[in-house]
Amino acid sequence: MKLNNIELSFDNFASEMAKLKNEKHFDYLVTIIGEDFGEEGLGCIYI
């Protein structure tokens, strides 16, 4: 399995999440497996 790192800004977060859901069938509540509230903000790991 290949993991891709995607960085999103606050301004385009909603539109990029909608794009992932519609084009790649990602569902935030189903596919997120981790969160990191580090020094640089929120990070997510999707499978």
Image (cartoon, rainbow, N blue to C red):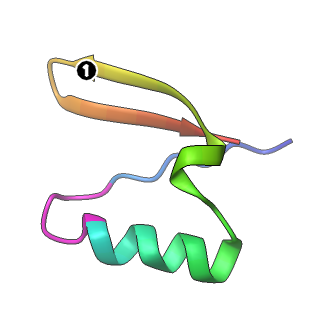
Expressed as whole percent of the image width and height from the top left, the position of residue 37 reads 25, 20
Expressed as whole percent of the image width and height from the top left, the position of residue 40 reads 17, 28
Expressed as whole percent of the image width and height from the top left, the position of residue 15 reads 32, 78
Q: Report the residue at 52% width, 52% height from top.
A: 28
The residue carrying mark 1 is: 37
Which residue is nearer to you in this view: 18 or 12?
18
Which residue is nearer to you in this view: 9 or 25?
25
Expressed as whole percent of the image width and height from the top left, the position of residue 35 reads 41, 25
**What is the three-letter code of the residue carrying label 1?**
Phe
From this view, report whether residue 18 is shown above or below residue 4: below
Magenta-colored span: 8-13
Q: Is residue 10 magenta?
A: yes
> Please, which residue is most extreme toward the right here?
1
From this view, report whether residue 33 is shown above or below residue 24: above
State how many labels appear.
1
Is residue 39 left or right of 4 when viewed as pictured?
left
Is residue 16 left or right of 24 when viewed as pictured?
left
Q: Report the residue at 51% width, 46% height from top.
A: 5
Q: Report the residue at 57% width, 72% height from top.
A: 21
Q: Is residue 35 magenta?
A: no
Secondary structure of the residue carrying tag 1 is: strand
From this view, report whether residue 16 is shown above or below residue 13: below
Which residue is nearer to you in this view: 9 or 27?
27
Q: Residues within 10 Å of mark 1 (few under 14, many from 20)?
A: few
Q: In which quarter of the image is the C terminus?
A: top right
